[in-house]
Image (cartoon, rainbow, N blue to C red):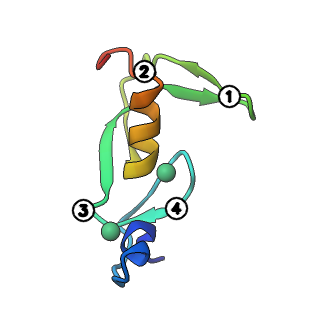
Amino acid sequence: MKCYECALIGKDTDAVGICIVCGKGVCKEHLIHEETPVWEGDYPVELKPDREHIKRIVCLSCHEALKDNCLFNEVC
Ligand SMILES: [Zn+2]
Ligand SMILES: [Zn+2]
């Protein structure tokens, strides 16, 4: 799989991870590795604080979307 973010800017980079939110491949420069809320069920998703504190991979755009929505309890 190729990095989706790199593809947008015309680069061809192998993905090293997959965003848990949108399922896009991301290279190491475009992934965010951090603790995220837990997704349960389908849309509308219910977000719960992550009690296990497992670091997950999200892409940059999903990371921004999550922050905008202030869903990162520890961060906001
Ligand atoms: Zn990339
Ligand atoms: Zn994503």
User: Quick one: label 3 or label 1, which is nearer the N terminus?
Assistant: 3
Q: Nearer the viewer, mark 2 or mark 3?
A: 2
How far across and down, in percent of the image, does residue 76 sit?
A: 32, 16
Q: Quadrant of residue 43?
A: top right
Q: Which residue is mark 2?
A: 70
How far across and down, in percent of the image, does residue 65 sit?
A: 46, 37
Disc 3 residue lies near ligand 1 with CB under 8 A: yes
Dot 3 crowding, Cα within 10 Å, few <14, some 14–19, many 20+: some
Circles 1 and 4: CB atoms closer than 8 Å: no
Q: CA distance from mark 4 to mark 2?
A: 22 Å
How far across and down, in percent of the image, does residue 16 sit?
A: 35, 67
Q: CA distance from mark 4 to mark 3?
A: 14 Å
Q: Nearer the viewer, mark 2 or mark 1?
A: 2
User: Quick one: label 4 or label 2, which is nearer the N terminus?
Assistant: 4
Mark 1 secondary-structure assignment: loop
Q: Which residue is mark 1?
A: 45
Disc 4 residue lies near ligand 2 with CB under 8 A: yes
Q: CA distance from mark 2 to mark 3?
A: 23 Å
Dot 2 crowding, Cα within 10 Å, few <14, some 14–19, many 20+: few
**Residue type marked 4:** Lys
Residue 29: mark in rendering? 3
Q: CA distance from mark 1 to mark 4?
A: 18 Å
Mark 3 secondary-structure assignment: loop
User: Quick one: label 1 or label 4, which is nearer the N terminus?
Assistant: 4
Q: Nearer the viewer, mark 4 or mark 2?
A: 2
Q: Which residue is mark 4?
A: 24
* Residue nearest the viewer, comparing 33 with 29: 29
**Residue type marked 1:** Val
The answer to whether 8 is drawn above or below residue 63 in the figure is: below
The answer to whether 42 is drawn above or below residue 58 in the figure is: above
